[in-house]
Amino acid sequence: MNKLTVKIKKLDNFHGELPAYQSAGASGVDVRAQLSGPVTLKPGERAMIPTGLSFEIPLGFEIQARPRSGWAAKSGLTVLNTPGTIDADYRGEVKIIVINLGNEPVTISDQERCAQLVVAPVYQATFELVNELSDTERGAGGFGSTGRA
């Protein structure tokens, strides 16, 4: 398993446990809501959930905020901009943009695990302007052009 040091800062609104991997093979760490009171989202509503944390991510990496599968499957609560990107040069509080895609209101309470964070490598591309691109079997076909099965 590859290891990387990421500096983490607890902000004034943080209390509780720091994110930690829950198993040896886990890809992400759960992050907890830092709320002064419950937040209830009606179907279709969204909110920014504070985590009380900021990070110093090494250059060449990002942190991705992803939904927790249990909440998504059971209640339709998901991270709106999945995966949400936290850039290496961002030093502010990480907030999770959640949306209720379910049919019933969902309440988020203080200290609930609201998302998972995954550290991922990033490559910055050098873009080269050309007049033609190489051919492929798919070509310009998109949005369902390869079929459903």
Image (cartoon, rainbow, N blue to C red):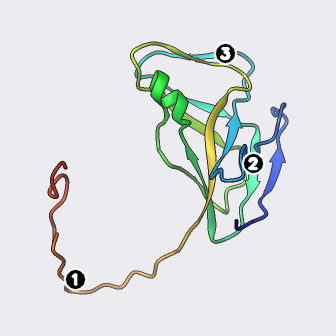
The answer to whether residue 17 of the structure is visible from this angle is yes
Residue 43 in percent (x, y) is at 42, 18
Q: Is mark 2 on a helix, strand or loop?
A: strand
Q: Residue at x 19, y 53 (%)?
A: 143
Q: Which amino acid does label 2 sit on?
A: Ser
Residue 54: mark: 2
Residue highlighted by disc 3: 38
Residue 114: mark: none
Q: Is mark 1 on a helix, strand or loop?
A: loop
Q: Which residue is drawn at 83% across and 48% down?
A: 9
Residue 133: mark: 1
Quarter holding residue 139 = bottom left
Residue 118 in percent (x, y) is at 62, 53
CA distance separating discs 2 and 1: 41 Å
Q: What residue type is labelled 3?
A: Pro
**N-terminal-most mark, 2 or 1:** 2
Proximity of marks 2 and 3: CB atoms separated by less than 8 Å = no
**N-terminal-most mark, 2 or 3:** 3
The answer to whether residue 77 of the structure is visible from this angle is no
Q: Residue at x 16, y 68 (%)?
A: 140
Q: What residue type is labelled 1?
A: Leu
CA distance separating discs 1 and 3: 52 Å
Is residue 11 placed above or below 83 in the rendered structure? above
